[in-house]
């Protein structure tokens, strides 16, 4: 009711553009003297509410790996990347379990595509 009153007079100011917000993981999360962090390494479906958490968590872990790398641990960046590579399949499993529980709108296009892609 309150929101409706605030936006009743609103009018579009331009075209509406949409874009996908798919989950993905980069094939390489580290390389010679570099690491990917947050959405540069992997992104999670916005419905999971994991984006901000993952960005902060991976930034902390990447900073430790970089520090260890510069302290002489040549495996630190690869170890960070290996840990990150293991997180994404676990996320996909969790997402499939949660999406599979939604029964109310199973026939809607929105949920059909999400359940099908697990």
Image (tube, rainbow, N blue to C red):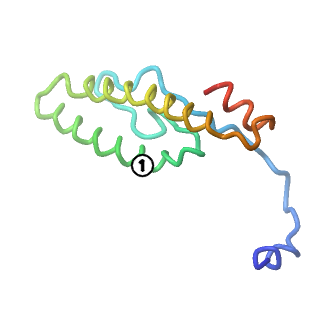
Q: Is residue 88 left or right of residue 16?
A: left
Q: Position of residue 87 (x, y in %)?
A: 39, 30
In the rendered structure, the answer to whether residue 58 lies left or right of residue 115 reads: left
Instruction: Say left or right for 82 vs 39.
Output: left
Q: Which residue is mark 1?
A: 53
- Provide residue 99's location: percent of width, then percent of height: 61, 36
Q: How many numbered tags mark residues here?
A: 1
Q: Quadrant of residue 81?
A: top left
What quarter of the picture does the C terminus occupy? top right
Residue drawn at 54 percent across, 44 percent down: 48
Q: Between 53 and 65, which is closer to the camera in this rendering? A: 53
Out of 51 and 75, give the one closest to the viewer.
Answer: 51
Q: Position of residue 1 (x, y in %)?
A: 79, 77
Up/down of 115 relative to 13, above or below: above
- Outermost residue toward the left in this view: 72
Quarter-of-image position of residue 54: top left
Q: Could you say where residue 21 lies in the image, as x and y percent from the top left? A: 64, 39
Eyeballing the image, is 53 above or below 109? below
Residue at left offset 19%, top offset 22%: 75
Q: SS at mark 1?
A: helix
Q: Nearer the viewer, residue 67 or 55?
A: 55
């Amino acid at each position: 009711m309150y929101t409706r009153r605030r936006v009743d007079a609103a009018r579009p100011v331009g075209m509406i553009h949409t874009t996908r917000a798919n989950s993905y993981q980069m094939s390489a999360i580290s390389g010679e003297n570099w690491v990917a962090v947050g959405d540069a390494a992997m992104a999670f479906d916005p419905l999971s509410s994991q984006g901000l958490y993952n960005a902060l968590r991976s930034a902390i872990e990447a900073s430790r790996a970089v520090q260890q790398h510069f302290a002489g641990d040549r495996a630190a960046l690869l170890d960070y990347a290996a840990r990150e590579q293991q997180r994404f399949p676990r996320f996909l499993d969790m997402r499939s379990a949660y999406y599979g529980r939604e029964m109310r709108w199973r026939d809607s296009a929105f949920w059909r595509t999400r359940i099908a892609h697990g």
